[in-house]
Image (cartoon, rainbow, N blue to C red):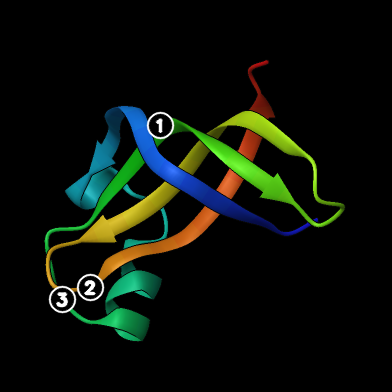
């Protein structure tokens, strides 16, 4: 099920960085070199059916690249 992030992501934390990221090789091949980090945070999301829920999100990001592979992990409401 796809979703759209509404507003800002709160409670942002770094889960992993550098060589502790399992798919670091893939990220560098597809998006380029950078200081890659796996992040998590909480945000309001709009689901395909139009409902709005608060969910925990995980994603990867690097300076100059931005957020990639944003996943919804669980609902927190």
Compare marks 2 and 3 and give the one earlier in the sequence.
3
Q: Residues within 10 Å of mark 2 (few under 14, many from 20)?
A: some
The vertical placement of 57 against 49, above or below, is: above
Which residue sits at x=79%, y=41%? 51
The vertical placement of 14 against 48, above or below, is: above
Tell me, yes or no, whether the two marked residues, 1 and 3, touch with CB atoms within 8 Å. no
Separation of residues labelled 1 and 3 (CA atoms): 24 Å
Is label 2 or label 3 in front?
2
Q: How crowded is mark 3: few (under 14 residues within 10 Å), some or many (20 or more)?
A: some
Compare marks 1 and 3 and give the one earlier in the sequence.
3
- The residue tagged 2 is 65
In what element is the residue under mark 1?
Answer: strand
For this rendering, which residue is in front, 27 or 53?
53
- The residue tagged 1 is 41
In what element is the residue under mark 2?
Answer: loop
The vertical placement of 66 against 73, above or below, is: below
Separation of residues labelled 1 and 2 (CA atoms): 18 Å
Tell me, yes or no, whether the two marked residues, 2 and 3, touch with CB atoms within 8 Å. no
Is label 1 or label 3 in front?
1
- The residue tagged 3 is 33
Separation of residues labelled 2 and 3 (CA atoms): 9 Å
Q: Where is residue 76 in the image (x, y as percent from the top left)?
A: 63, 18
Tell me, yes or no, whether the two marked residues, 1 and 2, touch with CB atoms within 8 Å. no
Q: Position of residue 27 (x, y in %)?
A: 35, 71
Q: Residues within 10 Å of mark 1 (few under 14, many from 20)?
A: some
Q: Where is residue 13 in the image (x, y as percent from the top left)?
A: 28, 28
Image quadrant where one finds the C terminus: top right
Which residue sits at x=18%, y=50%? 18
């Amino acid at each position: 099920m796809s979703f759209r992030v509404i507003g800002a992501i709160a409670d942002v934390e770094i889960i992993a960085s550098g060589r502790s990221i399992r798919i670091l090789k893939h990220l560098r091949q597809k998006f380029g070199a950078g200081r890659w980090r796996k992040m998590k945070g909480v945000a309001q999301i709009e689901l395909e059916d139009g409902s709005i829920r608060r969910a925990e999100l995980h994603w990867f990001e690097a300076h100059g690249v931005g957020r990639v592979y944003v996943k919804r992990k669980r609902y927190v409401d």
